[in-house]
Image: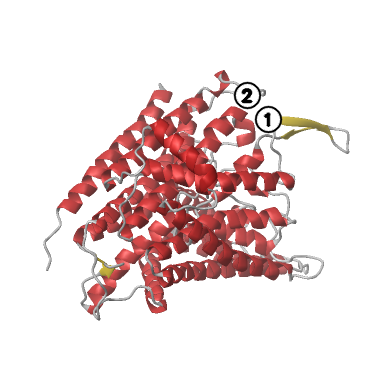
Amino acid sequence: MFSWMYLGLFLAASLLLTILLGRYMAKVFDGQPTLLTPILAPLEKLILRIAGIPNTESQHWTRYAQDLVLFNLVCGVITFLILCFQHLLPLNPLKLAGMEPWQAFNTICSFVTNTNWQSYSGEVSLTNLSQMLGITFMQVVGAVSGVAVCAGFLRGLTNRPLGHFYQDFTKALLYVFLPVMVVGSLFFMSQGVPQTLDQQTVVRTVEGATQKIALGPVASLLTIKQVGTNGGGFFNANSAHPFENPNPLTNFVEIMLELSIPMGLVYMFGLWLKDRKQGWVIWSAMMSMFLVFLWVGHAFEQAGNPILTHLPGTSLSVDQHATALQSGGNMEGKEVRFGILPSMLFTVATTGTSSGAVNNMHDSLTPIAGMVPMADMMLNIIFGGVGVGLMGFLLYGIIAVFLTGLMVGRTPEIFGKKIEKPEIVLASIAILLHPLIILVPTAIAATNDFGLSSLNNAGPHGLSEILYAYTSAAANNGSAFAGLNANTPWYNISIGLVILLGRYISIIALLAIAGSLLAKPKVEPGPGTLRTNTLLYGAVWLGVILIVGALTFVPVLVLGPVAEHLAMLRGKLF
Amino acid sequence: MTMLLALGLFIAFFIGLLGFIRFCEWVLSRREVTS
């Protein structure tokens, strides 16, 4: 009963946040006044004046993309130096050493791209200065960059001047992220999440032993981690740690924070297009896939492990049914204070939105439920990361109008603009790169000692661990399946490069498409126009996503989680 | 030395991205005239 109330509340809150945040962001990025304008506008003007950025100028897409690339490069280099030389910098009461260079490379690739894959344990590897000035700062930069780029891309699609990268960055930071970060941090502190510069506290346990408990500025990092769909936790256990997710209420708020901006951007797109129906078609398509993934994952987790139902060679069995006294199902790797449905809801939200925060261990999911987050990241468009998820979904939209246009013999058009060969070439590069950067390094790692030696599990489960790592990297998700030691030169370098390719190639290709469409005359819809704002077209869109996006991964999924599931049914575990 | 290699690889990737922006520009410039 609690689980289904939790789900009902989730759907109601999703609808409310979509509309409220969508309207708000549409005004912010359109330069219209909002409730916060009287407070923040003077600050915005001051920042732009100090930085020497013109207040009204719109950029060509190439300049917009260059500014993104150069800004992210500078932020990455600064953070690299902070991480490598943290032993020489202040706020290091535990006298921690500098980070190893390849691990620092992996970390900056991860955090500048909003991926937040971690091959380190934050509480024992990073000083408070590194956590605040390196990690939290980069979480903000990565997330705000994504929203800024999405604003530029959506302007291109909705026939507005593309805007200016630094103006959009400043607006997203001040008007969207800053208020949420302040309110969110205060809320989490009220729920017991620490926010202190003390790095640890020493306590005496009930048995009389001495225990050191890690502390730090957790609440502020947690808020940007969730709202920015970053995912890199303060603690290695991430949102499963009681200091990073103390109760079901914080769990719910964390889920909603992950989804709020990606959902709001879909509504904002509909508003800018002056076609709310188009926004709702996209939102419904994303939400329907979200619910299907949740249903599949929840069903397999609630069913539990069939081997436990009848323990082999004995007459013993484990009751895995949900009753008033137990949650039933597979509770391995889950927190009792959350249970199965809130854990799966978190899993589907975190892998759909490229967040990567976890409140349960994905490595402990049953094989098919473990395939759900992988498939979520392989598609990478179920609301997606802040900004880039909607961009990915619209990318499939461009391919869908092209394919359906070919089928019915019409010139492909989307949002009143004709789609031609150059747009299809760029869209194809962005779409084909995603499976390439997952499958090729997975194959290399799965066939060489330098990849296999990091595994903790053999057989199909081991393949799933490698596949999950590269899928998470390519989708800029950052969640880990666990069971894989990723802190080796091979994994630090290869995962770092996959993360960079997964982020920037598609963003640049999409900005190019937006710039190209913006330069074209708007075509008024006629009787021959294929309308994209209908439920039928939403279904076609989903079909293209499943055929083009998902089928590529079927063979490797069969070798990994599906094979593991079939083996489990025959009594074999890995 | 390893530190320079790691930092160099990161910077080289971003310089490559500037090249990719030029490539996208080139693709868009090869638009075929359609009726």
Residue A52 x, y percent position in the rendering = 36, 32
Residue A429 x, y percent position in the rendering = 28, 54
Q: Is residue A86 left or right of residue A315?
A: left
- Residue drawn at 44 percent across, 38 percent down: A45
* Numbered label tally: 2
Q: Is residue A286 left or right of residue A435?
A: right
A12, B4: nearer the viewer? A12
Label 2 sits on what residue type? Answer: Leu
Query: CB atoms at circles 1 and 2 under 8 Å apart?
Result: yes
Q: Is residue A90 visible?
A: yes
Q: Is residue A479 visible?
A: no
Residue A372 x, y percent position in the rendering = 53, 62
Q: Chain of mark 1?
A: A
A516, B2: nearer the viewer? A516
Q: Which residue is most to the bottom? A: A527
Label 1 sits on what residue type? Answer: Leu
Q: Earlier in the sequence, mark 1 or mark 2?
A: 2
Q: Residues within 10 Å of mark 1 (few under 14, many from 20)?
A: few
Residue A505 x, y percent position in the rendering = 33, 48
**Location of residue A64 by image quarter:** top left
**Location of residue A305 by image quarter:** bottom right
Q: Chain of mark 2?
A: A
A1, A495: nearer the viewer? A1
Residue at the spot of label 1: A197
Considering the image in quadrants, where does the N terminus of chain A appear? bottom right
A394, A327: nearer the viewer? A394
Residue A91 badge: 2
Label 1 sits on a secondary structure element that is loop
- Residue drawn at 75 percent across, 70 percent down: A322
